[in-house]
Image (cartoon, rainbow, N blue to C red):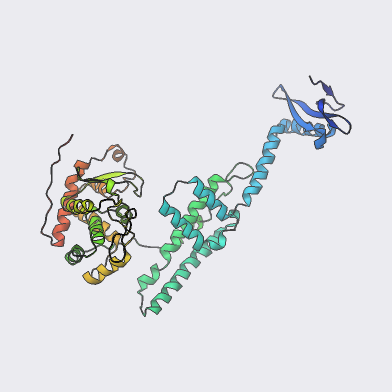
């Protein structure tokens, strides 16, 4: 058993190793002893081969005792080591670049695939020159300047495209050009830097970023005003639109557009709808990959049910209700789904003379629902909107059958506005 021996320095002692040798003799291992809060404390310092001497140990001991008396600094070698490690880590953290932070952000956060794609697009376009920039070097001024540059560059490109097409844009179009995209990029940067503030620490254990530089845009009211799009298919335009779509040669596109019209679903929810998510027996469908990540089962109104029943019965072996197809409408792959049909939408606009977007169909559904004086809570459930801060709503469990009547009334009204003859009829379903 090793025997501890005193040195000429108070509170410093050593033991000699039975196996290690240094300079032809047994190597010494040093420790210090002192009192803290009335209790004796002993801490190991290290081997003399590492440069540890009795004088060094005495100096450490004196520094610790002085700190204990003054109530500041480190009170032990362990605390001294922790402070040193924290400073080293903080120094390394200060060198973190925006690209490195973004990679940590993706690894840590649980994000949907589409969100990841959008964030990567921002990094590769708006912040491509900032990828190797240290996050601590991103200033409020640089954020404000880049925000303006993003908008100005987009406006310049928009004008160039208009000139090429010999099109004269309106003042409203010029005001909006690039504004929404510039705001979107900066909101992503704000989210990323908020993550950095919580993920990276300085030497004192506080956030590496004390303030998010993107706050400058809010504090100076520099965010570009972009009004929410209010376009819908107007009631007097719906018959022309509905007639063209109902007679569309490509049944995948036709049924997809009608699905959005009669359910108010988001375009991505319709595109990714799998056959397994449609329960023909219960006349209901379930959306799994929703925007707010809450699976939702909803009733199918009668007219739409007939459309989907016929479609699904003809799709043996296919995974999706609206499968991928080539330009001619031929189903090309049983395991892929339709992608956003921009060309077909443009063709429908040209033939019907009715301007619309896929999201306009969702707005039209909600507008019709509001006009029927349905409960706001039912409408939110039907379109899978968050109930927000409605505490009571958090206790209400959606019932498919309770939503069947509101859904059918909406379909009936849409068919009426479209001038279609067929009207919905409520079908009572037996339970259990």
> Would you say 62 lies left or right of 307 here?
right
| Residue that extends furthest to the bottom in the rendered view of this protein | 166
> Would you say 403 lies left or right of 26 here?
left
Q: Quadrant of the N terminus?
A: top right
Residue at horizontal 13%, vertical 58%? 416
| Residue that extends furthest to the right in the rendered view of this protein | 24
Above or below, 130 against 4 in this view is below
Above or below, 313 against 332 in this view is above
> Would you say 69 lies left or right of 420 here?
right
Above or below, 324 against 55 in this view is below
Where in the figure is residue 15, as x and y percent of width and height?
A: 81, 25
Residue 163's quadrant in the figure? bottom left
Residue 255 in view of the camera: yes
| Residue that extends furthest to the left in the rendered view of this protein | 421
Q: Nearer the viewer, residue 125 or 395?
A: 125
Q: Nearer the viewer, residue 3 or 7?
A: 3
Where in the figure is residue 69, as x and y percent of width and height?
A: 73, 30
Above or below, 377 against 218 in this view is above
| Residue that extends furthest to the top in the rendered view of this protein | 1
Q: Quadrant of the C terminus?
A: top left
> Would you say 28 lies left or right of 272 here?
right
Residue 218 in view of the camera: no
Where in the figure is residue 201, as x and y percent of width and height?
A: 59, 44
Q: How many marks?
A: 0
Q: Nearer the viewer, residue 429 or 165?
A: 429
Where in the figure is residue 225, as x and y percent of width and height?
A: 40, 63
């Amino acid at each position: 058993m090793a025997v501890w021996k005193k040195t000429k320095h108070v509170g410093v002692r050593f033991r000699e190793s039975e196996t290690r040798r240094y300079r032809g003799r047994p190597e010494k291992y040093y420790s210090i002893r002192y009192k803290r809060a009335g209790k004796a404390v002993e801490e190991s310092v290290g081997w003399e081969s590492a440069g540890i001497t009795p004088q060094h140990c005495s100096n450490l001991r004196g520094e610790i005792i002085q700190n204990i008396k003054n109530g500041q600094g480190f009170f032990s070698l362990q605390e001294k080591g922790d402070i040193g490690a924290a400073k080293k880590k903080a120094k390394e953290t200060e060198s973190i670049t925006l690209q490195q932070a973004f990679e940590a952000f993706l690894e840590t956060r649980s994000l949907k695939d589409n969100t990841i794609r959008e964030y990567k697009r921002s990094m590769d376009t708006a912040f491509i020159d900032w990828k190797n920039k240290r996050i601590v070097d991103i200033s409020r001024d640089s954020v404000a300047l880049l925000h303006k540059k993003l908008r100005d560059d987009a406006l310049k490109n928009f004008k160039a495209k208009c000139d090429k097409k010999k099109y004269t844009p309106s003042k409203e179009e010029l005001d909006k050009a690039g504004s929404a995209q510039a705001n979107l990029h900066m909101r992503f940067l704000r989210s990323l830097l908020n993550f950095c503030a919580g993920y990276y620490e300085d030497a004192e254990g506080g956030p590496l970023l004390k303030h998010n530089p993107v706050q400058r845009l809010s504090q100076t009211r520099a965010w570009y005003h972009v009004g929410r799009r209010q376009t819908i298919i107007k009631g007097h335009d719906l018959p022309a639109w509905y007639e063209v779509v109902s007679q569309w040669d490509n049944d995948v596109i036709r049924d997809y557009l009608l699905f959005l019209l009669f359910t108010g679903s988001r375009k991505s929810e319709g595109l990714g709808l799998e056959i397994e998510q449609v329960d023909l027996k219960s006349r209901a469908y379930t959306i799994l990959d929703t925007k707010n990540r809450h699976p939702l089962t909803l009733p199918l109104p009668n007219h739409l049910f007939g459309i989907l029943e016929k479609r699904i019965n003809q799709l043996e072996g296919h995974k999706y209700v609206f499968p991928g197809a080539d330009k001619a409408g031929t189903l090309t792959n049983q395991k892929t789904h339709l992608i956003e049909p921009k060309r077909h939408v443009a063709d429908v606009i040209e033939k019907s003379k009715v301007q619309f977007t896929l999201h306009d169909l969702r707005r039209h559904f909600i507008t019709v629902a509001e006009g029927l004086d349905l409960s706001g809570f039912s409408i939110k459930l039907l379109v899978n909107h968050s109930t927000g801060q409605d505490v009571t709503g958090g206790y209400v469990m959606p019932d498919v059958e309770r939503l069947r009547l509101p859904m059918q009334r909406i379909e009936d009204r849409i068919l009426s506005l479209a001038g279609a003859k067929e009207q919905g009829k409520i079908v009572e379903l037996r339970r259990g």
